[in-house]
Image (tube, helix red, strand yellow):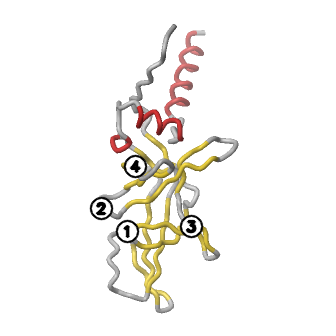
């Protein structure tokens, strides 16, 4: 009997430690209004790999990192942000935050609070849908997202958010 209890406890710990904590509208409001932490002090992660590509004829582009391939007279700059890459965020507006996966002034992606009806309002990669694909701005350039367009923002589990409640 004791063995089963211990086994159930270990399984429960493993299950709870693997739970993902997505940033949602309510959590962001609590972080920013209670004054215990600022959004800039919270550790974030992407829930899936994000791959970007920038196509140009110029060899003078200043894009740091990634890989460059020459194909059909165009230079293709590929940037990959692996799954669960640590990031920091900065307030942009009520519905959007800038998420920095790398150091640099313009090396961020915008995540926006979208209502996913059955799941609630979560922060997802924000960009523009065109006939040619989904585009985001990174390093000041419009880049096509070839993987991870529906990436959501995860946050570190041990964020201390104090909630004051009135008692009777």
The residue mark sitting in front, 2 or 3, is 3
Name the element at disc 2: loop
Q: Residue 14 in the image: x percent, y percent?
A: 52, 30
Say which residue appears at 30% left-offset and 58% top-offset: 103
Is residue 140 depicted above or below 72 in this figure? above
Say which residue appears at 52% left-offset and 56% top-offset: 125
User: Nearer the N terminus, badge 2 or badge 4?
Assistant: 4
Say which residue appears at 53% left-offset and 36% top-offset: 26
- Residue at label 1? 139
Q: Residue 1 in the image: x percent, y percent?
A: 60, 9
- Residue at label 3? 128
Q: Distance between the residues labelled 2 and 1?
A: 8 Å
Q: Distance between the residues labelled 2 and 4?
A: 16 Å
Q: Distance between the residues labelled 1 and 3?
A: 16 Å
Crowd class of label 4 (few under 14; some 14 to 19; many from 20; radius 10 Å) = some
User: Nearer the N terminus, badge 2 or badge 3?
Assistant: 2
User: Nearer the N terminus, badge 4 or badge 3?
Assistant: 4
- Residue at label 2? 104
Q: Are marks 2 and 1 in contact (CB under 8 Å)?
A: yes
Q: How far apart are marks 2 and 3 (CA)?
A: 23 Å
The residue mark sitting in front, 1 or 3, is 3
Name the element at disc 3: strand
User: Nearer the N terminus, badge 4 or badge 1?
Assistant: 4
Crowd class of label 1 (few under 14; some 14 to 19; many from 20; radius 10 Å) = some
User: Nearer the N terminus, badge 1 or badge 3?
Assistant: 3
Q: Residue 131 in the image: x percent, y percent?
A: 64, 75
Looking at the image, which residue sits at the far top? Answer: 168
Say which residue appears at 35% left-offset and 32% top-offset: 35
- Residue at label 4? 91
């Amino acid at each position: 009997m004791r063995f089963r209890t211990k086994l159930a406890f270990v399984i429960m710990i493993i299950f709870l430690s693997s739970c993902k904590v997505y940033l949602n509208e309510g959590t962001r409001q609590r972080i920013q209004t209670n004054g215990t932490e600022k959004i800039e002090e919270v550790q974030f992660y992407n829930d899936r790999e994000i791959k970007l590509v920038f196509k140009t004829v110029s060899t003078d582009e200043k894009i740091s990192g990634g890989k460059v391939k020459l194909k059909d007279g165009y230079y293709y700059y590929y940037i990959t942000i692996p799954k669960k890459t640590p990031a920091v965020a900065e307030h942009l507006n009520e519905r959007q935050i800038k998420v920095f996966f790398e150091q640099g002034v313009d090396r961020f992606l915008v995540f926006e609070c979208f209502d996913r009806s059955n799941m609630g309002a979560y922060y997802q990669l924000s960009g523009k849908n065109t006939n040619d694909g989904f585009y985001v701005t990174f390093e000041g350039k419009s880049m096509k997202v070839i993987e991870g367009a529906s990436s959501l923002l995860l946050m570190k589990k041990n964020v201390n958010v104090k909630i004051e409640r009135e008692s009777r």
